[in-house]
Image (cartoon, rainbow, N blue to C red):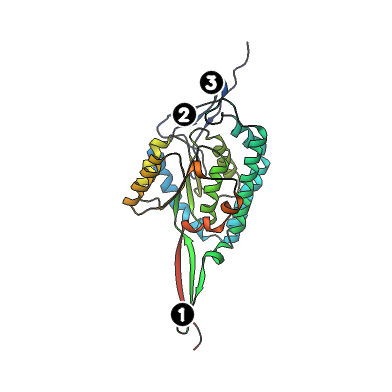
Amino acid sequence: MAREPILKTWKLFIGGAFPRTESGRTMILWGANDRVIAHCCQGSRKDLRNTVEVARKALPGWWGRDAYNRSQILYRIAEMAEGRTAELVDAIRCVPEAGTDRAPSAATARKEVARGIDRLVAFAGWCDKFPQVIGSRNPVNGPYHDFTMPEPTGVCGVIAPNEPSFLGLVSHLAPVLAGGNVAIALASETNPLPAMVLAEICATSDVPGGVVNVLTGYRRELLPEFADHRDIDAIAGATEHRDERRLLELGSADNMKRVRLEDADDIDYHDDDARHSPWTIEPFTEMKTIWHPSGS
């Protein structure tokens, strides 16, 4: 008799730990030929609310770190992702591409992983440099120095596109973290496994608990809570269709949440010039102006 493999049940990643969803629900991840690949937790609105509390507590410690130290931590994530390239490639390839019954080629998946790792390295480099780019020393009439400097917006929701499941998540997550924010990421609904591998990388690297949190679940259930929750300060990411964008924008308008959304079909995640820009950090910062006397 052939041995049946033991399928992994992927849990949520909240506060540096891997709890099960409070609802006890799971999602079945289907591969090619109607084969069950894994089970993932179906995160609930209560899971999201719990995660917001954890992320809010982690914010002061993350922002209070030296910018160079945040840079080292992002670089460490990239280092560990490099060491788990084969696992990330397998995670990307376990689910057929949208509209087909074929998995992405190994070469395509390796290219996606390599670009995602490079993106983490790029934003690791910006952590202690972007304030000089988007900040300023302002000319004033008087014996003063006047400086404008960026500070983090706070707790940011990061909505990953369904495809590319790894590169799409990293592209929206890295600028948020580089800016000193903490993140609650909603993984790709069609293939959450690369996001959960990234969560395991964060859990075993130098990332403080609560700085990066990853939820899996259905967008139709969780996106309204992302928009309505008053302790989420900003939302970044990609929407799959117009109704999602409208839902997030209208819900966020009620509580004055910052929103920076892009249409998933229109994004070129392989455009390094645009995606590595420090100006992708700027939407998730608040500008603080300081006056300091000079001279006598």
Q: Which residue lies at the image location 53% right of the left edge and 31% below the top edge? A: 98
Front: mark 2 or 1:
1
Cα gap from disc 1 to disc 3, whole angstroms? 67 Å
Q: Secondary structure at mark 3?
A: helix
Within 10 Å of the Cα at label 2, are there few (<14), some (14-19), or many (20+) other Cα atoms? some
The amino acid pointed to by label 1 is: Val
The amino acid pointed to by label 3 is: Asp
The amino acid pointed to by label 2 is: Met
Q: Position of residue 12 (x, y in %)?
A: 49, 37
Within 10 Å of the Cα at label 1, are there few (<14), some (14-19), or many (20+) other Cα atoms? few
In primary-sequence order, the first of circles 1 and 3 is 3
Q: Secondary structure at mark 2?
A: strand
Q: Is residue 160 visible?
A: no
Front: mark 2 or 3:
3
Q: Position of residue 55 (x, y in %)?
A: 45, 49
Q: Which residue lies at the image location 59% right of the left edge and 49% below the top edge? A: 271
Residue that label 1 marks = 140
Residue that label 3 marks = 34
Query: Residue extending furthest front?
Result: 266
Residue that label 2 marks = 27
Within 10 Å of the Cα at label 3, are there few (<14), some (14-19), or many (20+) other Cα atoms? few
In primary-sequence order, the first of circles 2 and 1 is 2
In primary-sequence order, the first of circles 2 and 3 is 2
Q: Relative to 224, does residue 182 appear above or below in the rendering?
A: below
Which quarter of the picture shows residue 128? bottom right
Q: Is residue 135 visible?
A: yes
Cα gap from disc 2 to disc 3, whole angstroms? 14 Å
**Marks 2 and 1: CB-CB under 8 Å?**
no
Q: Nearer the viewer, residue 199 or 96?
A: 96
